[in-house]
């Protein structure tokens, strides 16, 4: 008896035919399925990146200043489809590996039921995130590139530009450059600040003694000049209008000017209008800073004088 046969008898090792059977019917199929899963994963990521690049290229080579709602939705939908496709690939690969190892599927029914029940109780939030993400995408509440304000569970808020949307999370980048990851199930209210069109709102605080008959024509001229400006007019959907006195305080009045803009351009338009208004008011000799004397200040002055 050879040493290999002796070792096989002592340690109950398979024979040469058994090793071949184990290699070709067990180990090799597992390795092939793993390689196929990795290649399929890479293909899905490559295809998703290609389609996304094509959408971005169409926007870059167009005359549009902002993305269309269709392009935003397509971008978000591609990310979701690729995420779901990768999950299906690995689930199917896991099933094939278990089958290749010769593990009877019927024997896994009872343990799978127990594990599924445990995960059902422990992963309720994950399921909630997935369902919320599904309705978020299908209802087109927001998409890639939108500027949104999300009210979250607990009263907190998250605001920024949407950089990634999946069935489970939404990733925002705020004005400080920070990336905020929000589980979709935690979103109570989604305010889209760049849906179809936006509105720039400019409130001008003026002293209570200001001559409104002089201020209103001046602001109307600011709006007309803004509408005829070659650069700013491309961001405006209509001429900025003066709404009039919005509120009256003890020491000041607030005059409001509004302008309808392209999606997401309300901040740039608002800054430009404020700059124009400040220059025009300064030229006309009107002080933008409100009078700070209030009833409390007068009372404190009397106490100090005593």
Image (cartoon, grey):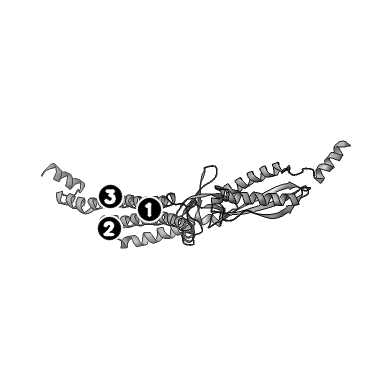
The residue that disc 2 covers is 99
**Local secondary structure at mark 3:** helix
Q: Nearer the viewer, residue 156 or 266?
A: 266
Q: Mark 3–mark 2 contact, CB under 8 Å?
A: no
Mark 1 vs mark 2: which is more N-terminal?
Answer: 1
- Say few, some or many: other residues with alpha carbon within 10 Å of mark 3 (under 14 / 14 to 19 / 20 or more): few
The residue shown at (41%, 59%) is: 116
Residue under pointer 1: 51
Q: Quadrant of residue 153?
A: bottom right
Upstream in sequence: badge 3 or badge 1:
3
Residue that appears at 81% across and 42% down:
297
Question: Could you tell me residue 306's position as x and y percent?
Answer: 89, 37
Mark 2 and mark 1 in contact (Cβ < 8 Å)? no
How far separated are the C-alphas under marks 3 and 2? 16 Å
In this view, the residue in front, 186 or 25, is 186
Q: Give the labeled residue for mark 3.
A: 35
SS type, badge 1: helix
Mark 1 burial class by Cα count in 10 Å: few <14, some 14-19, many 20+? some
Residue 80 placed where, x, y %?
A: 42, 56
Q: Could you say where residue 71 lies in the image, as x and y percent from the top left?
A: 45, 56
Task: Answer left or right for 279 relative to 39.
Answer: right
Would you say the residues marked 3 and 1 are in contact, meaning their CB atoms lie under 8 Å apart? no
């Amino acid at each position: 008896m050879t040493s290999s046969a002796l070792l096989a008898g002592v340690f109950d090792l398979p024979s040469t035919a058994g090793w071949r059977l184990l290699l070709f019917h067990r180990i090799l199929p597992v390795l092939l399925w793993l390689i196929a899963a990795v290649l399929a994963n890479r293909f899905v990521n490559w295809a998703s990146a290609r389609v996304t690049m094509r959408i971005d290229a169409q926007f870059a080579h167009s005359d549009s200043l902002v993305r269309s709602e269709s392009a935003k939705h397509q971008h978000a939908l591609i990310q979701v489809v690729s995420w779901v496709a990768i999950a299906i690939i690995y689930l199917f690969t896991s099933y094939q590996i278990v089958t290749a190892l010769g593990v009877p599927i019927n024997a896994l029914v009872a343990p799978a039921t127990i594990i599924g029940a445990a995960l059902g109780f422990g992963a309720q939030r994950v399921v909630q995130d997935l369902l919320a993400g599904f309705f978020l995408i299908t209802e087109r509440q927001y998409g890639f590139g939108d500027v949104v304000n999300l009210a979250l569970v607990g009263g907190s808020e998250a605001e920024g530009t949407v950089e990634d949307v999946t069935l489970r999370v939404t990733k925002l980048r705020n004005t400080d450059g920070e990336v905020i990851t929000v589980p979709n199930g935690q979103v109570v209210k989604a305010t889209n600040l760049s849906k179809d069109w936006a509105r720039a709102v400019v409130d001008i605080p003026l002293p209570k003694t200001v001559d409104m008959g002089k201020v209103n024509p001046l602001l109307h001229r600011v709006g007309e000049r803004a509408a005829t400006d070659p650069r700013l007019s491309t961001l405006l959907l209509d001429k900025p209008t003066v709404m009039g006195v919005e509120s009256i305080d003890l020491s000041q009045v607030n005059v409001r000017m509004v302008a309808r803009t392209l999606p997401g351009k309300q901040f740039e338009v608002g800054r430009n209008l404020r700059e124009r208004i400040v220059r025009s008011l300064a030229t006309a000799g009107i002080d933008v800073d409100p009078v700070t004397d209030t009833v409390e200040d007068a009372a404190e002055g009397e106490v100090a004088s005593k």
